[in-house]
Amino acid sequence: MNASQPADTELGLSRPENLRDLFWSFTRLALQGFGGVVAIVQRELVEEKKWMTREQFLEDWSVAQILPGANVVNLSLMIGDRYFGMRGALVALAGMLAFPMLVVILVALAFAGVADSPHVQGALTGLGAVAAGLIAATGLKLAAALGKNIMGSVVCWFLVVVTIVAIAAFRVPLIAVLVVAGGPAWVWAYRQLRKTALAKDSE
């Protein structure tokens, strides 16, 4: 943590009590993650457990988003490592994968016999719409954190619009969006942070 950033206690944040707490927290989180897990992750880590602020979640989720692999798995590794080092990363990962993998295997075995049922197809279609709604709702919640972003709200919203249009309207590959929009954003954020640090040093 940067010395200029407030401590977790000042922000009213908590932390996992031990490795067992970390494991079961991510297990419970993973078992709730039907369809769009980002909504569950944000609610559990930010609103329920208070392990991070909404702004911190947005920053960590951004990193998890651009790394290879599943976003929430990347995030679990980052959070586990943050509190307990490599042991924490492995425990958080085990919590994310162990029981959900067992459930998926059991559901897959059961689903194989009823996959062609109209009732099952209807249920899956309905769940897909709910998952989209969960992700959209989480996006709206996280959008409030952009007001505190070092880049400024105007720049942030410009990048949000560019990203949505590029992906939704023009179907630009994610990696291209990250390079074209994320690259300049990275440089701009670095300049703003540097400017802020220099201003504090001169005081």
Image (spheres, rainbow, N blue to C red):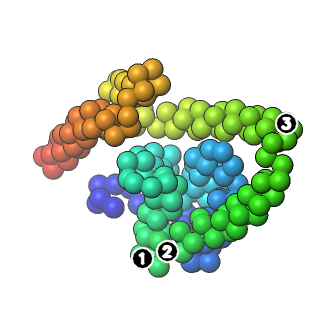
Question: Which structural element holds mark 2?
Answer: helix
Q: Residue at x 53, y 68 (%)?
A: 93
Task: Say if 50 sits above or below 161 in the image.
Answer: below
Vertical position of residue 150 compared to residue 42: above or below: above
Amino acid type of disc 1?
Met
Residue 38 in sight from this viewpoint: yes
In the rendered structure, which amino acid carries the disc numbered 3?
Pro
> Residues under labels 3 and 2: Cα distance?
41 Å
Badge 1 element? helix
- SS under mark 3: helix
In the figure, is residue 132 to the left or right of 6? right
Q: Viewer-proximal residue, 82 or 148?
A: 82
Q: Which residue is mark 3?
A: 118
Q: Which residue does the numbered mark 2 point to in the structure image?
A: 90
Q: Going from the N terminus, do you reach mark 3 or mark 2 first?
A: 2
Residue drawn at the location 15% of the way across and 45% of the way down: 198
Going 29% across and 55% down the picture, which residue do you hit? 4
